[in-house]
Amino acid sequence: MSSFDENLKKYAELVVKVGLNLRAGQRLIINNGVTRGIPVHSAPLVREITRAAYRAGARFVDVIWGDEEMLRIRAELAPRDSTDEYSTWHINALTSMVEHGDALLSIACHNPDLLSGLDPDFVSGMQKTHLKNYSPVSALVSRNAINWCVIAGASQNWAKKIFPDLNPEKAEEKLWQAIFAATRVDQPDPVKAWGKHIEKLRARANYLQAKQYTALKYTAPGTDLTIGLPRGHKWISAQSLAENGIVFTANMPTEEVFTLPDRTRVDGTVQATFPLSYAGTLIEDFSVTFEKGRIAKVTAKNGEAALKHLIETDEGASYLGEVSLVPASSPIGARGHLFYNTLFDENASCHIAIGRAYRFTLTGGEELTDEEFIKSGGNVSITHVDFMIGSSKMDVDGVKEDGSTEPVLRAGEWTIEA
């Protein structure tokens, strides 16, 4: 067995044991929520995960396959008034599994430039229709109804975007190496390494939970932003407890601790520190200004139209749903290059998310109606898009009940020992 084959097998075992923590008797469905199915080039990874799942006692494993090029062909050639067309069979398959308490795995492996250069209005309409139809699945995931996990698999198109000076085969090989390193698969005992990593993240989340700051204040070049935190907010790290009773790790890799911003108490301007790859468009050199929680202004050197389409997705897309702290020296940040994939890039830097909030970041949030959740400071939307704002020049302060502040990050690094 080659070293790649060995690492792929270790990766699959790690995803099943630590990511999903799959239980004997559970079913598992594998999907890609962005491109409506797993591209065939990810078959070797999917097969290894399937083997690992059955070894763990899975009762049934199913996969929704897809071809991302079909999206590009549609965006190029379909009638301009056809963005509302949608096939829901895969939504039915996903909701059936999730409502039954089974596990969900999403594999990120799409081409960041898939829809670049195409009609932005059509792409936006197509994306909005998908998000509307996918919202039942998103709602279940946002409250941790089941054990779920998001991972990545390399592809040549994605790899060439990251490593343009390499030929497609070498670029893909290098991307796989980066994925294995970021997920600790390259360590002698990946499961043990993840155990130690999770403990460290939990310690930071516990510290912030005990503090119960009323707000976080961000200061950096181009950034002067205050994000209020609602009463009852919960700081979350790698692991979560699902409603089906299973403790799982939702993202692999993960370097963040995150919580719920107060929907109406966000004020100031923030400068993005990484480009955002969204809906096949690269949004670069952009800033966002908030007034009483709502996005009042956006500017971008490239991709401004796509950014405006994003915040117009629905009412909730004009507000924040997540605030996350990540040190600038995180293993992914230290690599010194973009991945053009939010699963990785969000773990290189502090970030915030436009749109839907996770119900589990508010005490009792899972039991609230949409109206009650919003009244408590949460946000409801069909979209959830993270963008990166942290750097080695950023300071973050916690604001206490009496208005005084204390340092949380200085020059992008934790002031909290873990």
Image (cartoon, grey):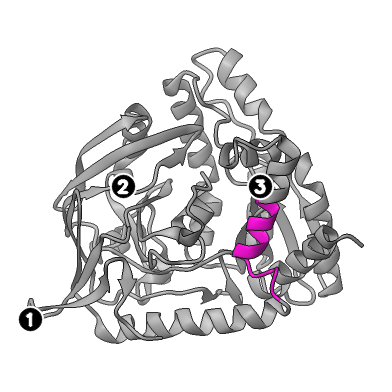
Residue 395 on image: x %, y %: 23, 66
The mark found on residue 92 in the picture is: 3
Q: CA distance from mark 1 to mark 3?
A: 50 Å
Q: Quadrant of residue 351?
A: bottom left
Image quadrant holding the N terminus, namely: bottom right
The amino acid type of the residue labelled 1 equals Asp
Q: Main secondary structure of the magenta part?
A: helix
Q: Quadrant of residue 359?
A: bottom left
Residue 82 on image: x %, y %: 53, 19
Along the polypeptide, which appears first: circle 2 or circle 3?
A: 3
In this rendering, the label closer to the viewer, 2 or 1? 2
Residue 371 on image: x %, y %: 30, 58
At a point 31% along the width and 66% down the height, the residue shown is 412
Left or right of 304, for residue 13: right
> Depth check: 196 or 292 in front?
196
* In magenta segment, residue 185: yes
Left or right of 277, for residue 45: right
Circle 2 packing at 10 Å, graded few (<14), some (14-19), many (20+), is many
Query: Callout 2: helix, strand or loop?
Result: loop
Magenta residues? Answer: 175-187
Report the residue marked by disc 2: 272
